[in-house]
Image (cartoon, helix red, strand yellow):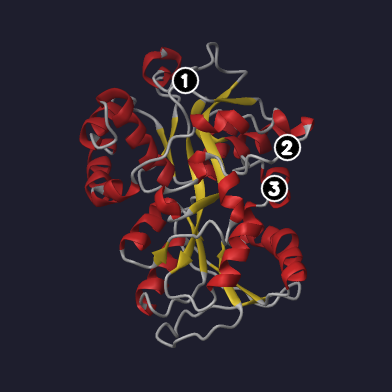
Amino acid sequence: MSKPIRRRTFLRAAAGVTAASTLGFPYIARAAGPLVVNSYGGSFEKFMRKEIIPPFVKETGIDLTLDVGLGKGWLTNLRAAGTEHPPYDVLMTNESWASVERGEGHFEPIPVDKVPNLKDCWPVARYPNDDAVIGVLAPIGLCYRTDLVKTPPTSWKDLWDNPEFKGKTAMYTITNSAGYMFSLLTAKMYHGSQHEVDKAIDTIKKLKPFNQVDFSGTLETVLTRGEAIIGPLDFPAVARMKKKGIKVEVVAPKEGVFMFDQVFNVLKGSKNKENGYKWINYILRPDVQLKWVRNYFYSPVNKNVALPNDLKSVVPIHGARMKEVIKWDWTAANKVRDHVIERWNKEMRR
């Protein structure tokens, strides 16, 4: 779900649900009307239109508009519109973007009495004061080729300590949120705090040479071809690879796993908050969460989701194991992000 930003796509009118965008008209105040939510494009959008949106519309009778794009575009639209006249009622995005938007005053807390499923979410999905909630979660562990690795990893430190990984590791570039999270993990793991990012860059440099990739699909390809034998990858991607017969496995290192997340936020200036609360409550509902599990192998955030036996091994990070998922202070991380990117580009390209 964390992808390089190349372009923004807005698609319209499918399966009885109108897709629209306020891009280009950011300063027009939007009265309460259709509930405006957002989605990524491609298979994600198709899934939303086919599996998620129609039952919601049928059950509630709420008219819903879907805006399709990417995180940077949504941030641009919010800034252009201002906090009082947002183009969305509920925004779903990575926390790396949401923390910026929250800091600029675009969001407000989610009332538990309006979203009762909040109380059934695992702690990792909730925020202080319920400022937001994670509705979609894909843990990231260490993926390796079972036919090419002699000693399977058990720790993130094995990337440094196991000589068979030298020169055969794949790594996200720093501009991908997973690459940045790996630097935060390295800072915490070796230097005691996620804030020690400069020291982390020096430590990661010791892994060179490694294969840098832009996003998960590229990392999957690199592993499939054997150009690398190990690298950080989300559990759902590994599940898809295994279904194709590729000889890979993924482990949750003993230090924990980080995640690709989709955070749901209520816009402070929304004129349609009551319906927005219903949308978030619906997303968190156990049966809806199970749809995400079945279709994408995401880890359910609701404690009441009972995984069928055929999915328990495919989605190993669930239930009590959700405590293994690490959350970051993205507000602090974003303050030094430009510096980290600059240092990464300088040190890793030598």
- Cβ–Cβ under 8 Å for marks 2 and 3: yes
Q: Position of 219 compared to 187: left or right?
A: right
Residue 245 is at least partly visible in this image: no
The disc at residue 165 is: none
Q: Residue at x 33, y 36 (%)?
A: 184
| Residue at image mark 3 | 286
Place of residue 26 in the rendered image (x, y in percent of width and height, measured from the top left): 42, 82
Residue 230 is at least partly visible in this image: yes
For residue 342, above or below residue 168: below
| Residue at image mark 2 | 306
For residue 250, above or below residue 131: above
| Distance from Cα at disc 2 to Cα at disc 1 | 25 Å
| Distance from Cα at disc 2 to Cα at disc 3 | 8 Å
Of badges 1 and 3, nearer the viewer stands: 3
The disc at residue 254 is: 1
Q: Residues within 10 Å of mark 2 (few under 14, many from 20)?
A: some
Q: Position of 185 compared to 200: left or right?
A: right
Q: Secondary structure at mark 3?
A: helix
Q: Quadrant of residue 251?
A: top right
Q: Secondary structure at mark 2?
A: loop
Q: Quadrant of residue 51?
A: bottom right
